[in-house]
């Protein structure tokens, strides 16, 4: 069947600075919240980096990026998503001047991408706030943090304006309500935070996101800037109207953030929620003007779908930051994430029907415990047919959405090379087309080996999706 993917479809892969670079304190980099989160999203933070935090060295991308980008180019990547570690550029977050060595690293990284004809897609902050902003200002709790983020964004927009034409403001900006320390450098324990404090922090981050959207349009007129949302795809567990209503309300975890970025204002239901629950968020007239700076596209992560039910006794399931109920029609990954390719088409359709903006899938993938074997040709590899099946099935659904007329800009599968898992802070939850010889204990020679999926994806890109 003739491929429905547009000729300029941006095929690629995604990582995040904190999960791949390592060099956590090299060349002037300051500590980020990730450096003191040794056990991942749900882990307890520490005050200083601990040796068991695999992210301190990760997969040494900081020193090996040329080799890795050459492998991405071998697969035919058109785009490569990564983030700029904020604390490499402003080690304390509120420094007056940027760290030149940090700027130089990303100059070299983006040059290497462009040398191979790969467009960088850059996330300004992928859960990587400078720890010092937490210690001095309590992160997004303090409105002054907006100006520090603006300074960071302005610096990198100006520095890389001729190299980077695709930008995302914050990774999974809706996650702050679930993980305020990781997403907002908020040191106050989540349990102690009032809703007014949490939503005030969320508001400051949203104003920062809109403000840098404006800056990007001013500094790099030919660039596109998008928001990035954790795609929480929710189905009612049963056709019971109670489950349907619960699902409708749960959907707002995702869509209220897309709404603000796409429409440039708070949805009425969120303002009503503030009013009904005496949640005091100081939304100034100036904030409202800034929020009107809307994005050029909506990007999101999609891994699985969840069910919602009014019947609390129904069985719960996994999900990275969003819990749901088991869907009896779906299988689960080893980490309990339910595999639902059709849910990706559902989410694409829903987001486009709501906001009529181009869409970019910037995370999708299967985390699995891969086993390194020796192939017929004597080379080390992984027979990851399970990952090929997962990705193939999801891309088939993307193609159906495109065939429905939904403008999908591109697809960067998550963890295009094995990196440290965000939620578990482990290496054993592998996503990559490329295996990295490093284990949960930090042992291994960091060598890279092409998995079976490496050749599969190379063919998908070469045929622009014809081979799916
Ligand atoms: C998303 C994050 C990514 C990535 C992904 C997979 O929420 O944006 O950083 O980690 O989750 O999750 P995990 O690595 O926990 O399997």
Image (tube, rainbow, N blue to C red):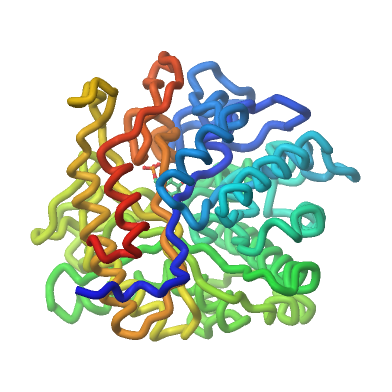
Identify the residue at the far front of this view. Answer: 377
- In the shown orientation, is residue 444 left or right of residue 193? left
Does residue 100 appear anywhere in the picture? yes
Q: Residue at x 22, y 21 (%)?
A: 374
Does 65 appear above or below 333? above
Q: Which residue is drawn at 18% across and 42% down?
A: 385
Q: Which of 31 and 282 is in front in this view?
A: 31
Query: The N terminus appears in which quarter of the rendering?
Result: bottom left
Query: The C terminus appears in which quarter of the rendering?
Result: bottom left
- Residue 375, by quadrant, is top left
Does residue 134 appear anywhere in the picture? no
- In the shown orientation, is residue 455 left or right of residue 225? left
Q: Which residue is drawn at 68% across and 81% down?
A: 292
Q: Which of 198 and 426 is in front in this view?
A: 426
Does 66 appear above or below 46? below
Identify the residue at the far right of this view. Answer: 96
Percent across and percent down for residue 389 are: 19, 51
- In the shown orientation, is residue 193 left or right of residue 334? right
Percent across and percent down for residue 458 are: 34, 50
Identify the residue at the far left of this view. Answer: 328
Percent across and percent down for residue 332 are: 17, 48
Count of marks overlaid on the render: 0
Q: Which residue is drawn at 28% across and 43% down?
A: 453
Does 383 appear above or below 263? above
């Amino acid at each position: 069947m003739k491929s429905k993917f547009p000729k300029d479809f941006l095929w690629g892969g995604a990582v995040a600075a904190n999960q791949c670079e390592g060099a956590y304190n090299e060349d002037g980099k300051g500590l980020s919240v990730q450096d003191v989160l040794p056990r991942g999203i749900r882990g307890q933070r520490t005050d200083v980096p601990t040796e068991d935090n695999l992210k301190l060295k990760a997969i040494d991308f900081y020193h090996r990026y040329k080799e890795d980008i050459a492998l991405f180019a071998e697969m035919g990547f058109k785009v490569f998503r990564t983030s700029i570690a904020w604390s490499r550029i402003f080690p304390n977050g509120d420094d007056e001047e940027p760290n030149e060595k940090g700027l130089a690293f990303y100059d070299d990284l983006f040059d290497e991408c462009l040398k191979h004809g790969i467009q960088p897609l850059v996330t300004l902050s992928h859960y990587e706030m400078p720890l010092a902003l937490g210690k001095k200002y309590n992160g997004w709790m303090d409105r002054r943090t907006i100006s520090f983020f603006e300074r960071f964004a302005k610096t990198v927009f100006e520095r890389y304006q001729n190299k980077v034409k695709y930008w995302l403001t914050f990774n999974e900006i809706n996650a702050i309500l679930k993980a305020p320390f990781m997403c907002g450098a908020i040191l106050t324990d989540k349990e102690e935070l009032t809703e007014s404090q949490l939503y005030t922090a969320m508001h400051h981050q949203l104003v920062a996101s809109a403000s840098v959207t404006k800056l990007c349009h001013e500094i790099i007129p030919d660039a596109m800037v998008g928001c990035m949302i954790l795609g929480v795809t929710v189905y009612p567990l049963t056709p019971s109207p109670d489950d349907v209503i619960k699902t409708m309300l749960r959907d707002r975890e995702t869509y209220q953030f897309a709404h603000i970025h796409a429409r440039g204002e708070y949805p009425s239901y969120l303002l009503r929620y503030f009013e009904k629950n005496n949640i005091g968020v100081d939304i100034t007239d100036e904030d409202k003007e800034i929020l009107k700076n809307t994005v050029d596209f909506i990007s999101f992560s999609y891994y699985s779908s969840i069910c919602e039910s009014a019947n609390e006794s129904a069985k719960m399931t996994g999900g990275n930051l969003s819990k749901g109920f088991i869907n009896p029609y779906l299988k689960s990954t080893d980490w309990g994430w339910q595999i639902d390719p059709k849910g990706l088409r559902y989410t694409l359709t829903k987001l486009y029907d709501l906001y009529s903006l181009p869409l970019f899938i910037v995370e999708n993938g299967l985390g699995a415990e891969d086993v390194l074997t020796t192939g017929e040709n004597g080379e080390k590899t992984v027979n990851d047919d399970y990952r090929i099946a997962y990705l193939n099935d999801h891309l088939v659904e993307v193609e159906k959405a495109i065939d429905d007329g939904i403008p999908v800009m591109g697809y960067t599968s998550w963890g295009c090379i094995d990196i440290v898992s965000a939620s578990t802070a482990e290496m054993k939850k592998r996503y990559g087309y490329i295996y990295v010889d490093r284990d949960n204990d930090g042992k291994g020679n960091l060598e890279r080996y092409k998995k079976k999926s490496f050749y599969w994806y190379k063919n998908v890109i070469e045929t622009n999706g014809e081979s799916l």
